[in-house]
Image: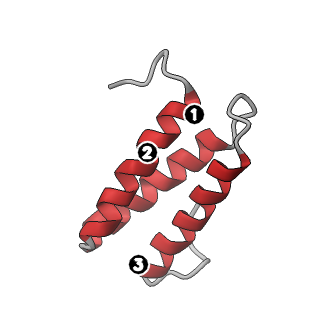
């Protein structure tokens, strides 16, 4: 799915679900993919057209959680 023509808020929610599924699996590869999904969702959630502060905060928390589980804490590449 290319994402063309999809509402950014809807796409962000899809990435949130995907990241959550990957985070639950717990393998290092899945954690990396979860972090990427959360970072992509955060970018979308920060789009002015989304205007959903709760969604943005959720992504910020998930990014921090994924980094923590990867052993990277709050520092690391963004």
The residue located at (24%, 73%) in the rendering is 27
Label 3 element class: loop
- Residue 55 is marked as none
Which mark, residue 9? Answer: 1
| Spatial separation of the CA atoms under disc 1 and disc 3 | 27 Å
Within-10-Å neighbours for mark 1: few <14, some 14–19, many 20+: some
Image quadrant of residue 15? top left
Q: CB of mark 1 within 8 Å of CB of mark 3? A: no
Q: What is the CA distance from the residue labelled 3 to the residue labelled 2?
A: 19 Å
How far from the left and from the top, in percent, is residue 48? Answer: 75, 33
In the rendered image, the residue lying farthest to the top is: 5
Q: Position of residue 73 (x, y in %)?
A: 55, 82
Give the distance between the C-alpha atoms of the residues marked 1 and 2, in whole angstroms: 10 Å
Q: Point out which mark residue 70 bears.
A: 3
Residue 2 or residue 20, whichever sits in front:
20
* Total marks in image: 3
Residue shown at the point (48%, 21%) measured from the top left: 6
- Which comes sooner in the sequence, label 1 or label 3? 1
Residue 34: where, in percent of width, then height? 38, 59
Residue bearing mark 2: 15
SS category of the residue bearing label 2:
helix
Locate residue 29 relative to residue 37 in the image: left or right. Answer: left
Disc 1 on helix, strand or loop? helix
Q: Which of the colour schemes (rainbow, by chain, secondary structure, one colour) is used? A: secondary structure
Can you give x and y, in whole percent of width and height, for residue 40 in the image?
51, 46
Considering only vertical position in the picture, is 37 above or below 32? above
Crowding near pointer 2: few (<14 within 10 Å), some, many (20+)? Answer: many
**Numbered disc in front, either 3 or 2:** 2
N-term-proximal mark, 3 vs 2? 2
Please say if the residues under marks 1 and 2 sit with CB atoms less than 8 Å apart: no
């Amino acid at each position: 799915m290319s994402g063309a023509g999809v509402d950014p808020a809807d796409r962000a929610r899809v990435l949130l679900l995907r990241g959550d599924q990957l985070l639950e699996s717990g393998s290092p590869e899945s954690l990396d993919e979860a972090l990427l999904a959360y970072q992509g969702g955060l970018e979308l959630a920060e789009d002015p057209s989304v205007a959903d502060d709760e969604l943005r905060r959720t992504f910020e928390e998930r990014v921090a959680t994924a980094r923590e589980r990867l052993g990277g804490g709050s520092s690391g590449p963004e």
